[in-house]
Image (cartoon, rainbow, N blue to C red):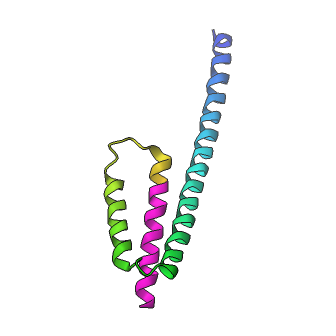
């Protein structure tokens, strides 16, 4: 009987290792999605702040408020990657607003 269970244990052990590797790769991917979204949004917001007189703190605050609302309304099931992208955009908007207030 123990010999019959040996291949099953080996497969289960390999499966656990594979799940850990996939989980780690997914975390790395999600972190990259967040960082890319943050970097792109931050660059976009700071460039608009410099070049577009209509881009005010109030406008950016309104955009941030709408991002907060969308973040809490996940009725469309956008998934982890879209959630991370949204979180990166929120963090960038918050940082730009904070920097804007400190320089004013």
x and y percentages locating residue 20 in the rendered image: 60, 39
Above or below 49: residue 39: above
x and y percentages locating residue 91 in the rendered image: 45, 67
- Give the quarter of the figure containing the C terminus: bottom left
Residue lying farthest bottom? 104
**Magenta-colored stretch includes residue 92:** yes
Above or below 89: residue 56: below
Residue lying farthest top? 1
Q: Please give left or right for residue 40 compared with residue 98 in the image.
A: right
**Magenta-colored stretch includes residue 90:** yes
Along the viewing direction, whichever of 55 and 27 lies nearer the viewer? 55
- Give the quarter of the figure containing the N terminus: top right
Number of marks present in the image shown: 0
x and y percentages locating residue 2 in the rendered image: 64, 13
Q: Residue at x 49, y 75 (%)?
A: 48
Magenta segment main secondary structure: helix
Q: Residue at x 44, y 70 (%)?
A: 93
Residues shaded magenta: 85-104
Q: Residue at x 51, y 80 (%)?
A: 51
x and y percentages locating residue 75 in the rendered image: 32, 43
Along the viewing direction, whichever of 28 and 51 lies nearer the viewer? 51
């Amino acid at each position: 009987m123990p010999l019959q269970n040996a291949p099953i244990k080996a497969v289960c052990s390999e499966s656990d290792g594979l799940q850990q590797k996939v989980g780690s790769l997914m975390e790395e991917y999600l972190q990259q999605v967040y960082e890319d979204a943050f970097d792109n949004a931050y660059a976009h917001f700071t460039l608009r702040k410099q070049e577009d007189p209509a881009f005010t703190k109030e406008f950016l605050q309104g955009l941030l408020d709408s991002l907060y609302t969308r973040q809490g309304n996940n009725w469309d099931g956008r998934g982890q990657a879209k959630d991370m992208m949204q979180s990166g955009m929120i963090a960038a908007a918050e940082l730009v607003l904070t920097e804007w207030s400190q320089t004013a």
